Structure formats: C-alpha cells, structure tokens
Image (cartoon, rainbow, N blue to C red):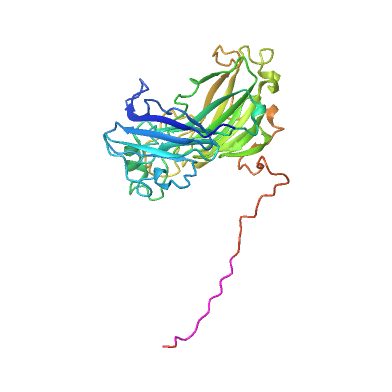
Amino acid sequence: MSDAATVYQTLYIDKVYPYPQSSKPVISANYSSPGPVIEAYQGDTLVIRVINRLNVSTTLHWHGMFQIGTPDMDGAVGATQCPIPAGREFTYTFKADPAGTAWYHGHWLEQYTDGLYGPIIIRRQVEPNRAQYDREQVLMVTDWYNEPARSKLSRWYLSTNNPDGVEPLPDAIAVNGKFSQSLFIPVSGTSRIRFRVINGASLSMYKFSIDGLPLHIIELDQIDTAPYNVSSFVINVAQRVSFYIDLRELDPIYSQSGSSSTNSIFIRFQAMTEMYPVDILNYNSPYDIQRYAYPTFFNPLYLAILSLDSTNATPTYQPRDANPMPQMASLPSDSNMLAARPFNLTNYIVPNPTHYLNLVVKFAVDSK
C-alpha cells in the first residue's frame, strides 16, 4: 500500500459558449462543462485552487466528501464559508474520503444549473470489484435549459404566479456536455467496462439502460456493493451509480448478425416524466393558465451510442420507444436500490429505519 499523497488541481471558473446554436453562457470549470475529473486515492490530501473569473461570486461544494475536521472546506455559502468574490481565488484543502464516485458543483445561487459541475473519483488502494472490468467511463447527465437559470427560476419557478412550486420543464437532456445522439463511446479492444453514472441535474431523474446488456451494479453513492444484475435503474438528482457490463453478454439481436448492420447499440437515459407537471408528448399543461412557456422540442428519451467497433456509427435499428427491448424482461428494473447489499458484509439485513423514543413528562406545582 502506497503512502498518502497530495493531489493538486487548479480550476478556473468562467463563462463559455460551447454550443453554436445557443447564445446561453455556460458556467464552466477549466472552460469545460462538465469540468475536469478530479482523481485521488482514499486518504490523499486534495489541494484545489479555485480562481473565480466570473463577474459574480462563486463557491464549489465537494458532494460526497466527508470533510472530517475540515467543515470550512465544504463550500456551502452562508453555512461553512463566505463566497469567493469576483476576480478572487480560494484554495480548498481536504482529505479524499470516502472512496467511490462523487462530484463537485457550484454552490452559489443557480450556478450548477448553468453548468458548473464535474466528477470526482476517489479510488481505494484495492478496489473490491476491480477484477470485473478493464476500463472505466464516466457518464454525467443533466437537464438543459435554453435560458440562464437565474431568469428561468426567478421569472417562473419562484414567481408569485406559481404558488404550487411547479418546476420548469427542461428544454433538453445533456450527457457529458453533449445532446442526444451526439455522444459516442468507442469500446473496441475490451469487453468489460465500468460505468460511473452521475446525475448532475437540477430537477430531473432518469431511468438508465443499455440495449441488450445486463447491468452489474457494484457501487451506490460511494458504497461498494456485492454485484447484482438489473436491466435498468432509476437515478435521482445527485445520486451516483457504478456498474460494469460484459460485451460477451450482449443479446445476439444487437450484433451485426442480428438486427443491426453496424456494431453499435444505444445507451438510454429516459426522463421520468411523472415528475413533470405537463403531458410531455402532447405539451398539455394540467393547469388552465400556463405558468411558463413549454419547450418546443424536449424529448424525454436521451440516446448515446456505444460503438463496439469504435467506428462511431449510429445503430441502424430504430430506438422504437422509451423502453428497452423485451428480451431484457427477465432481469428486474431497479427503481429504489433496495436489492443492494454492502460488499464486505455477509447475511446483511436492511436495518429498520423506524426508532421509537419514549418521553416521560411530569407536571408538578411550582414550589414558589
């Protein structure tokens, strides 16, 4: 086992305009959204210099880090620190703990909704499930709004005309900063890949699946789990799920000898439309008066392409509908992760979350 190290990282916080079709500024870390992956081993010391090049204040929150002994490094404005003023900088120093998949995001007003976020990977010296995969891939999903969040939230979400707190429907879904059918993941040369999925959305949850492949879940929110198999899972805001796939388990219907003449399959993020106060397919509001303008092109199904031969060709079969193909029906769809069990515990029983506390209250006449 190696000694703990000090890992240095500098993050420049600034606006970028990554999409030619959009005039909306994206708040970025190192001129990218998502920002760079921060990697360390458990027990290392992270020294992260944050330089604010915005014309407003900012902070970063390290979501998933324990911050034992360093609560002032947590990044929560008004709770653990003052914001970093425009044009100034601040250095965060804290232990990389616990191990697993975490993430960082802006914690000043709406900045993470506008793009200020990125992955954190804290590795163990010996990973419990390391023998099950040969490479890794991070997928960071978010909801995209065509307008800056400040105007969207203040004008609609936080308006007095919206007393029920109806959440604004996103205009699109983005994964790793790319829109549907523009993210290609080449995987030739290996058959076993670990995916680290992070939900960096503000208001959306998603059902995740990969066509024709079982998902072997091995980590939930920085807790290593005994591997268990599902056809899909639901991931809510801020959650992280790790799983591995084995391409040798691919259903033959998706191979070149099956329904696809190209060696590619779809990765699916299906927005859970039940949480939106609108009939997405028909754009019908349940209210007589629309509280905000609904998008004209929102599609609740996001498709990325897993390129098995690294040619980055789009699958020739049709995505059909929002559900995976029927041959995966024999595996469960995990909507609440109740099947998960910690990796290092045998005969684990889910603890009862209900605890009763008896209070004895006595009344007596005041002697005075």
Quadrant location of the N terminus?
A: top right
Q: Quadrant of residue 143?
A: top left
From which residue to which does the magenta span run? Answer: 357-366
In-front residue for pair 308/361: 361
Q: Is residue 325 visible?
A: no
Horizontal relation, residue 31 to residue 119: left or right: left
Residue 364 covered by magenta stretch: yes
Residue 234 covered by magenta stretch: no
Is residue 308 shown above or below 127?
Answer: above
Report the residue at 70% width, 47% height from top. Answer: 348
Report the residue at 61% width, 40% height from top. Answer: 335
Q: Quadrant of residue 217?
A: top right
Spot occupied by residue 354 in the image (x, y as percentages of width and height): 61, 58
Spot occupied by residue 226 in the image (x, y as percentages of width and height): 68, 38
Spot occupied by residue 361 in the image (x, y as percentages of width and height): 53, 76
In-front residue for pair 206/2: 2
Chief secondary structure of the magenta portion = loop
Count up the numbered dots: 0
Q: List the single residue furthest toward the bottom.
A: 367
In-front residue for pair 283/121: 121
Report the residue at 45% width, 43% height from top. Answer: 286
